[in-house]
Amino acid sequence: MLHLIYILVFTILAFLAVGNLIRNLMTLGIESQRSYGPQGRFTGGNNPYSRSRVAVPHPELLDDAGNVVDEPFLVMRSITVEDAREQLDAIYKASPGGETHDEV
């Protein structure tokens, strides 16, 4: 009897989850097709909480002079395991107390 209750409960939860998924996908589709005014989402008239959304870039996207950086932010190169181990050993040895590894 307990097994039937578990199956019934999980079936109900599965239907609720699938229904919620479909509802969220429909809402996302409607929101993606909606066009907003020049002020973004907050186009209310006398709404005290409405703010104009100005495109202010994140501080990490600016250089020292405040200009937007137009170069790649991350350049990855492949290195061997030995090179990585040597670099990590060099960092460890340069850290405070890195050379003093006494064994008891």
Image (spheres, rainbow, N blue to C red):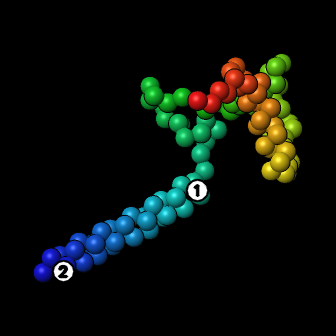
At horizontal 86% and vertical 36% (from top left) the residue drawn is: 70
Please tell me which of labels 2 and 1 falls first in the chain: 2
Relative placement, left or right, of 51 versus 71 is left
2 vs 1, front mark: 2
**Residue 2 visible in the picture:** yes
Q: Quadrant of the N terminus?
A: bottom left
Amino acid bearing label 2: Leu
Q: Which residue is mark 1?
A: 32
Splitting the image into 4 quarters, where does residue 9 fall?
Answer: bottom left
- Using the image, tell me which numbered label, if any, was put on residue 4: 2
Rendering coords of residue 99 (x, y %): 73, 25
Q: Quadrant of the C terminus?
A: top right
Amino acid bearing label 1: Ser
Rendering coords of residue 85 (x, y %): 78, 43
Relative placement, left or right, of 95 versus 18 is right
Q: Nearer the viewer, residue 64 or 47?
A: 64
Rendering coords of residue 103 (x, y %): 62, 30
Element type at mark 2: helix
- Other-residue count near label 1 (Cα within 10 Å), few / some / many at <14 / 14–19 / ≥20: few
At horizontal 73% and vertical 30% (from top left) the residue drawn is: 92
